[in-house]
Amino acid sequence: MNTAIPPFSDLSGLAAGLARRDFSAVELAQWTLDRLAADQTNSVLSLLPEATLGQAKAAQQRLDAADSGSMQQKGPGFSLLGLPIAHKDIFVTRGWPTTAASKILRGYLSPFDATVVQRLATAGMVCTAKLNCDEFAMGSGNTHSAFGPVKNPWDPIAVPGGSSGGSAAAVAAGHIPAATGTDTGGSIRQPSAMCGLTGIKPTYGRASRWGMIAYASSLDQAGPIARTALDCAVLLAAMCGFDSKDSTSLQLEEENFAAGIDQPFSGAPANAPLSGLRVGLPKEFFAEGLTAEVRSAIDQAVGELTRLGATACEVSLPRTALSIPAYYVIAPAEASSNLSRFDGVRYGHRASAPKDLLDLYCRSRAEGFGAEVKRRILIGTFVLSHGYYDAYYIQAQRVRRLVAQDFDAAFQDCDLIAGPVTPTVAWNIDQAASDPLQEYLADIYTLGVNLAGLPALSMPVGLGSGSDTGKLRPIGMQLIAPRLKESLLLKAAHHFQSATDWHRKTPEQFGAA
Ligand code: GLN
């Protein structure tokens, strides 16, 4: 192991190490590969050391060519050139296997890169691994992967959250400083919360969906999972931007989310940088079902925001409970349509010796998809079917509109909304999957954001007890902003992290890694 590389470093620290020549991009890549190869969490689905080291060499050449002065950026931002990243196996990646954690895509090699993958590569990031997730991103605990469940580095009998569980576990275990994730109903925020990390889901339309294997297209967004708000800001800026290949991509000027992240909120004094920021606490997020330990961690974090100058007020999101049935109609409906492309003909698993075309379709899909994916396809096909379409699908779309209106109304009284990400800390792997409904209900605080297309961030704010193993399990706080206000989320989180150290805690310090 290269001792110049401190484990559990954030991206900005590693960027400084590269700029100081403490280690090279190739040494950093090799160090990362060694850690990923020794992974105990089942977060890694594929490693391609040659490809990784090739990218690292190219990055080091670019670093060498750049005059060292130009690497010392002004302000809090930093260059991503030469830094390691790993991708959720939902992003197609040229030259790498891409499976969506499904047997149906075993052996699939994409001829092109997802836009997000390509943008991060253009920024000079080195792709180090493809990471485990719930099959087709359907799940909240990463127990629905065809390649087995992922373990939470804080407590290996616990789930890491899902569906971007491999991304969160690999970062939390200290293998990599950051990973990509996707969030259709919480899959960046919830595993970030359960693994003690910072993650952000941008406004719908900010990040291109091109090359992101589709789950529910009107909800899917990509985003980063990292240690700090600053790292997320730099990564998000590199990932997002207009892409003509995604018809829902927003035509906006590219935004540098790190610029001004350390500046006080509009006109606030430096010693109370969040003065003037109004934080709304939705009363429905603090109702029945929220465990006492999560509630107390959130209360303390809100207290910290107010110490930093913010004011807190109660707001209401009356349709919060309805976001669960609405989402679990709309997402499966879109999934049933998106997943119809896996037919055993064009790519992916093909059943052997089919009797006829129907037999080929039926057996390829029956053999290739896992139980949770089949459940979603069945639900989705049912709610779209003649006779039920109006009762379920159209009704869910109406509720979706009302959920979005609730957020609009709440933002009349506040600049940001704060609350828990999940009602509980991570549950045990063996508790999962016995009752799918329980898993769906745990998404209560995250789904509304996707239905409304809003940006939201999750950051660590405490540690809870979870189970009788004596190991601690992280607690996350969610910050939600109006459309396109990612920089406000990141600024609030950055000031919180400048005043606290929850984001610096690692499972290793607690004897769990
Ligand atoms: N848990 C939610 C689901 O299973 C969200 C998943 C996601 O965001 N990809 O649909």
Image (tube, rainbow, N blue to C red):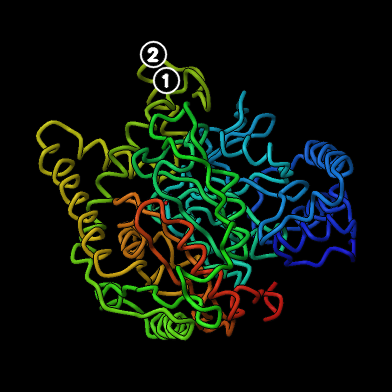
Dot 2 beta carbon under 8 Å from ligand 1? no
Q: Which residue is at the front of the view, 301 or 132?
A: 301
Q: Tell me if label 2 and label 1 are in contact, CB under 8 Å.
A: yes
Quick check: 456 left or right of 321?
Answer: right
Q: Position of residue 272 (x, y in %)?
A: 50, 81
| Res 162 seen here | no
| Res 343 seen here | yes
Quick check: 323 left or right of 74?
Answer: left
In the rendered view, tell whether residue 324 sits above or below residue 294: above
Q: Which residue is at the front of the view, 314 or 49?
A: 314
Q: Residue at x 71, y 61 (%)?
A: 12
Q: Position of residue 248 (x, y in %)?
A: 38, 34
Quickly name the residue at label 1.
360
Q: Residue at x 55, y 54 (%)?
A: 257
Give amino acid for label 1: Leu
Quick check: 193 left or right of 180?
Answer: left
Which residue is at the far front? 267
Quadrant assignment for the N terminus? bottom right
For the residue labelled by badge 1, is the local secondary structure a helix, a strand or a loop?
helix
Q: Position of residue 139 (x, y in %)?
A: 42, 53
Quarter of image, res 343:
top left
Mark 1, other Cα within 10 Å: few <14 / some 14–19 / many ≥20: some
Give amino acid for label 2: Asp
Q: Residue at x 81, y 41 (%)?
A: 59
State how far apart marks 2 and 1 are (Cα).
Answer: 6 Å
Quarter of image, res 391:
top left
In the rendered view, tell whether residue 154 sits above or below residue 75: below
The label on residue 356 is 2
Q: Position of residue 306 (x, y in %)?
A: 43, 83
The label on residue 49 is none
Q: Which residue is at the front of the view, 353 or 115?
A: 115
In the rendered view, tell whether residue 138 sits above or below residue 318: above
